[in-house]
Image (cartoon, rainbow, N blue to C red):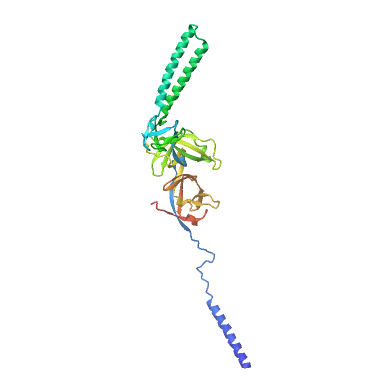
Amino acid sequence: MKSSIYLSLGLLLGVVLWMLSGAIASVPEPDADVDSNTEKVQVMKVKVIDVTAEEITREIVVQGELEPIRQVEIRAQTTSRVVGLPVNKGERVKADTPVIELAVEDRQAQFERAKAEVSNQKLEVAGARKLQKKGLQSETRLKAAEAGLAAAEADLKMARLELDYIRIKAPFDSVLEARYVELGSHLERGDPVSLMVDESVLKAVGQVSQQSAGELSLGQRINVRLLDGREAEGVVTYISRLGDAETHSFRMEAEVPNPDGLLNAGVSAEIRIAIGQEAAHFLSPAVLSLSDKGEVGVKSVSDDGLVHFHPIKLVRTEANGVWVSGLPQQLRVITQGQGFVSTGEAVIAVPASRG
């Protein structure tokens, strides 16, 4: 019994001595060449480009559409049947050109009868005046004859209008955009017959924000860009003084000449209005970033290698970039790595390829 206890104690003592000897042997000797107070810091590399401000035209850009300068829905002014369609849909016509013809019916006869009645009443008045001068006709009979002449002349005027109404004419130089009747259609007074559109001049119409409305004035030149790439120019002719209750924007209109009819009404258009000159930088949207305060801007590297953040203001957009203001005349903008560095951080600036 005692011998087994002594054996266990001996084995335990051996294990402890072995562990102590391994721990002591594993402690390295101090290296005189290593300074424990020195910490190595790796400096971030970023790609940069040098940009310089340019003088550009500051613009208000409005999304709108083109409308005809005027259009009217023509309605029948008399009752009759359609007997002629001398103008095809889509055809351009001059003012007073007949576009719908109605049946004459008995209108010509009524006109001739009215003419004859006027002639007869004129004779009655002439005779009454002669008799009145001789004292053989009272003033009352003369006035009655003159009243009969006035009534006959009114009837003649109405008969002449009825003849005119059967030829429905274009009110101005225009295009027959739509026709609502066919040969044989019976029309009542007030029935719509056609839509006439004047597109010799178009209106570029859009809503301007309340921040920009104050910078507009009548007579300002505008540039209109269509979705297919075509452009046209015009002049501001109307600026609303009453803002939209929901959007707080203001309607503006500009007249755009269209003498050749190459522009179509009803299409979307980008309206650009020049309002002055401004120094701006042209940048790729990819270089823009956000500050800790949520401001949109760019990060740059100064001559001493430190990162700086510059808030920007959007001036205008192009197909391949944006023009921004609010930056120094010249600066070195970070184009790659801006998301991994902070303001005040030291970096190594590496020139980036502009291609």
311 horizontally vs 175: left or right:
right
Quarter of the image where the N terminus is located: bottom right
Residue 64, how many percent across, how many down? 46, 41
Image point (48%, 17%), residue name? 148
> Looking at the picture, does residue 301 appear above or below residue 167?
below
Give whichever of 345, 158 is nearer the camera. 158
Image point (46%, 13%), residue name? 125
> Looking at the picture, does residue 285 appear above or below residue 210?
below
> Looking at the picture, does residue 101 appear above or below residue 121?
below
> Looking at the picture, does residue 336 appear above or below residue 127?
below
Q: Residue furthest top?
A: 134
Residue 349, how many percent across, how many down? 45, 54
Residue 89, how many percent across, how many down? 38, 38
Residue 100, how many percent across, how many down? 39, 33
Image label count: 0
Residue 27: name its quadrant. bottom right
Give whichever of 4, 316 is nearer the camera. 316
101 horizontally vs 210: left or right:
left
Q: Is residue 10 visible?
A: yes
Q: Is residue 256 visible?
A: no
Give whichever of 98, 82 is nearer the camera. 82
